[in-house]
Amino acid sequence: MTKRLQVLFDDAEYAALQAAAASRGMTVAEWVRQALTAARREASTADVDRKLAAIRSAVRHAGPTGPIERLGTETERGYLSAADPGGY
């Protein structure tokens, strides 16, 4: 379903929209839709302070580091030793 949105512009603003749309070979409506879509994509979807708090919390944790090959080998060795607690 589509919805209609009415936005009022003064003559100078509307003339600028018409010029911008014409320079791209599109209607004012299409230009406005694309501009709003681009603005929506660029808008943050969450609070910046909340994002920073999550990052700060994450960096306080320590974890294994190193080459992926070594980490994979160590992980596999851990799974194998857990599967065979007698070490056989």
Image (cartoon, grey):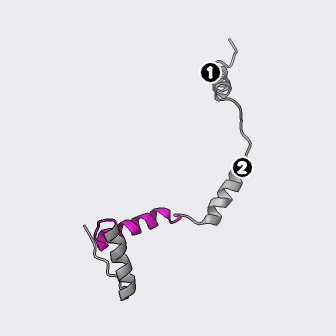
Q: Which mark is residue 83?
A: 1
Instruction: For label 1, count other residues whose C-alpha is less than 10 Å away and answer few (under 14), some (14-19) or many (20+).
Output: few
Closer to the camera, 28 or 57? 28
Left or right? Give the position of 20 relative to 55.
left
Residue at 29% across / 67% down in the picture? Answer: 26
Label 2 – label 1 distance at C-alpha = 32 Å
Q: Secondary structure at mark 1?
A: helix
Quadrant housing the N terminus: bottom left
Left or right? Give the position of 44 relative to 25.
right
Q: Quadrant of residue 6?
A: bottom left
Q: Quadrant of residue 24?
A: bottom left
Residue at 68% across / 50% down in the picture? Answer: 58
- Callout 2, which amino acid? Val
Q: Quadrant of residue 37?
A: bottom left
Q: Position of residue 27 (x, y in %)?
A: 28, 70
Q: Are marks 2 and 1 in contact (CB under 8 Å)?
A: no
Magenta segment boundaries in residue numbering: 24-44
Q: Position of residue 79 (x, y in %)?
A: 63, 24
Q: Position of residue 20 (x, y in %)?
A: 37, 72
Q: Position of residue 64 (x, y in %)?
A: 71, 35
- Callout 1, which amino acid? Ala
**28 part of magenta stretch:** yes
Mark 2 sits on what residue? Answer: 59
Closer to the camera, 46 or 33? 33
